[in-house]
């Protein structure tokens, strides 16, 4: 099978690095994704890459946001597709990695969702708000809440942006940090929550029903990432052509409707 779960990839990662396996050749790419719809896009790109460019893609499917960059930095995989530039900036800074984006994919707008209220104005004083607990998506959620007019933030980098950086909070909102993937399942426990589109759709939440969401000007476009020392390899050009193909765009429309905004156009 082309997909490998989180536990198996950990073992494979250790084996590959421990044995100092040679780099894949110019006709093969090991690429990491996060479980969910984006892996389905990569499956389509895999077919296109083989048919049009004689390029073999082997997909490794992860369950969290940590392992794909670890595996890439150590050479267990050649590329990954799961993150946006603000997240990559934080990872490179915190862990002193040298990873670089080689192309853009889609913007999946984050939204503010609620099963208790139909408009932002109805949120009560002291409302309990769920936000992602990883640094980049937490900063993204707080900026969304600010844009929605619910809070005002002090100037801060994404790496330092937490609820402690809230300057004005007129409704005295209370924030609880939760793993991004768990927020849709925990939505009933909150008055509202900031949820990424991929997780919202997987939980049968429609972005059309979000109380507020990002627009096409969002800087959080998903990117394809490789090691900086390998960025000029021809096989990565073929990878991006495959990912931007009409076939992949059609699959994105089928999966996300109008809520997958091409970030490269």
Image: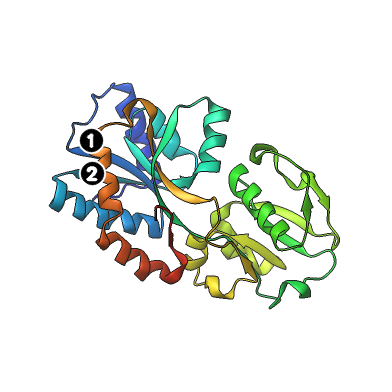
Q: Secondary structure at mark 1?
A: helix
Viewer-nearest residue: 261 or 51 = 261
Which residue is identified by label 1? 234
Quickly name the residue at label 2: 238
Which residue is at a point 42% across and 46% down the rendered structure image? 223
Residue 113, x across and y down, in percent: 63, 68
Question: Dot 2: few (<14), some (14–19), or many (≥20) neighbours within 10 Å?
Answer: some
Q: Position of residue 59 (x, y in %)?
A: 29, 46
Which x, y percent locates residue 174?
79, 57
The outermost residue toward the front is 265
Viewer-nearest residue: 98 or 188? 98
User: Helix or strand or loop: what does disc 2 sit on?
Assistant: helix
Judged left or right of residue 251, residue 86 is right
Image point (35%, 25%), residue name? 229
**Depicted 181 relative to depicted 252: above or below:** above
> On the picture, is 179 further left or further right than 78?
right
Q: Is residue 109 left or right of residue 170?
A: left
Q: How is the image coloured?
A: rainbow
Label pair 2/1, CB-CB below 8 angstroms: yes
Q: In this rendered view, identify the residue nearer to me: 189 or 133.
A: 133
Which residue sits at x=38%, y=48%?
A: 33
Instruction: Characterize the local packing of mark 1: few (<14), some (14-19) or many (20 or more) Cα atoms within 10 angstroms.
Output: few
Side of 85 relative to 136 (left or right) = left
Q: Nearer the viewer, residue 74 or 229?
A: 229
For residue 234, which quarter of the picture? top left
Q: Measuring 55% from the left and 55% from the top, which residue is drawn there?
A: 218
| Quadrant, the C terminus | bottom left
Figure quadrant of residue 32: top left
Q: Alpha carbon of mark 2 to alpha carbon of mark 1: how far?
A: 7 Å
Q: Residue 227 placed where, x, y %?
A: 38, 30
Marker count (numbered): 2
Above or below, 261 relative to 211:
above
């Amino acid at each position: 099978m082309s997909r490998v779960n989180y536990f198996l990839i950990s073992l494979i990662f250790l084996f590959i690095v421990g044995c100092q396996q040679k780099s894949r050749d110019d006709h093969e790419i090991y690429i990491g994704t996060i479980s969910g719809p984006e892996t389905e896009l990569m499956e389509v790109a895999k077919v296109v890459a083989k048919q049009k460019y004689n390029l073999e893609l082997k997909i490794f499917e992860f369950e969290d946001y940590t392992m794909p960059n670890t595996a890439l930095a150590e050479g267990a995989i050649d590329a990954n597709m799961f993150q946006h530039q603000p997240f990559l900036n934080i990872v490179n800074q915190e862990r002193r990695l040298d990873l670089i984006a080689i192309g853009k994919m889609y913007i999946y707008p984050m939204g503010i969702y609620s099963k208790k209220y139909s408009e932002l104005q109805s949120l009560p004083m002291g409302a309990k708000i769920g936000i992602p607990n990883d640094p980049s998506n937490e900063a993204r959620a707080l900026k969304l809440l600010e844009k929605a007019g619910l809070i005002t933030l002090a100037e801060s980098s994404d790496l330092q942006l937490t609820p402690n950086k809230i300057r004005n909070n007129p409704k005295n909102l209370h924030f609880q940090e939760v793993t991004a993937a768990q927020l849709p399942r925990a939505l009933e426990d909150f008055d509202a929550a900031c949820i990424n589109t991929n997780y919202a759709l997987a939980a049968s939440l429609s972005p059309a029903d979000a109380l507020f969401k990002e627009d096409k000007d969002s800087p959080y476009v998903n990117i394809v990432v490789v090691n900086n020392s390998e960025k000029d390899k021809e096989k990565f050009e073929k990878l991006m052509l495959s990912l931007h193909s009409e076939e992949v765009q059609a699959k994105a429309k089928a999966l996300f409707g109008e809520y997958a905004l091409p970030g490269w156009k």
